[in-house]
Amino acid sequence: MGWLRSFFRTREVIGIAAETLEFVLEAAADAHPNEYMGMLRGQSARELGIDRDGYLVTDVLVIPGTEAGPVSASVKSWMVPNDRYAVGSVHSHPNGVLRPSDEDLQTFGKGEVHIILGAPYNTRNWRAFGPDGEERRLPVFQVELPDPSAFFDFDQSDIDAELREDR
């Protein structure tokens, strides 16, 4: 499980962007009756115009090779990138149960927030949990998210600056 530890860095997550919540709910509905699974990424709240420290869940990484069925989903660990903005995970429970299973709890120790989505996949049918499996509050923020194509708009100077931040 070392791959999960390197993927997740401790970050205070203060909420989720409304657009991101809509995306995962739609993705889970599209995957139904199978589970949906993804890794959550965050962005600085201040960068999104919120005058608070912490991170908002803004992105979802769907890992290539993720296998999903009606009762479980699994990720190929070697496909998970080492992402400095990773803050947790999201997956669905097609049966609508909005609490973590024993298997879920085994992965919740990595990352700050873990979201479970349940059928019928609307804004009332999801819950957030901390690493210990305890339900936690995760407010929804109306923010304008950056253009997703900007994710690939970087050069060596951006990489160097990011590496300096990690020191």
Image (spheres, rainbow, N blue to C red):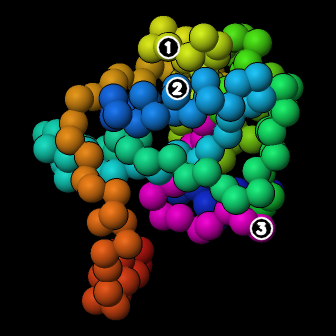
Q: Nearer the viewer, mark 3 or mark 2?
A: 2
Q: Earlier in the sequence, mark 3 or mark 1?
A: 3
Q: Are marks 2 and 1 in contact (CB under 8 Å)?
A: yes
Judge whether 79 appears above or below 102 on screen.
below
Q: Amino acid at mark 1?
A: Asn
Q: Amino acid at mark 3?
A: Trp
Q: Which residues are magenta?
A: 78-90
Judge whether 109 appears above or below 130 on screen.
below
User: As drawn, is 157 to the left or to the right of 115?
Assistant: left
Measure how far apart labels 2 and 1 are at the Cα level.
6 Å
- Frontmost residue, 137 versus 62: 62
- Frontmost residue, 9 versus 158: 158
Image spot of residue 118 (x, y percent): 64, 16
Image spot of residue 142 (x, y percent): 23, 29
User: In the rendered image, which quarter is residue 14 located in?
Assistant: top left
Residue 164 shows in the view: no
For the N terminus, the image quarter is: bottom right
Label 1 sits on a secondary structure element that is loop
Q: Which residue is mark 3?
A: 78
Identify the residue shown where x is 70% and y is 11%.
Answer: 96
Q: Which residue is mark 2?
A: 25
Q: Which residue is mark 1?
A: 122
Q: Amino acid at mark 2?
A: Leu
User: In the rendered image, which quarter is residue 157 located in?
Assistant: bottom left
Identify the residue shown where x is 76% and y is 12%.
Answer: 95
User: As drawn, is 78 to the left or to the right of 31?
Assistant: right
Image spot of residue 52 (x, y percent): 20, 39
Measure how far apart labels 3 and 1 are at the Cα level.
32 Å
Label 2 sits on a secondary structure element that is helix
Identify the residue shown where x is 32% and y is 86%.
Answer: 155
Q: Residues within 10 Å of mark 3 (few under 14, many from 20)?
A: few
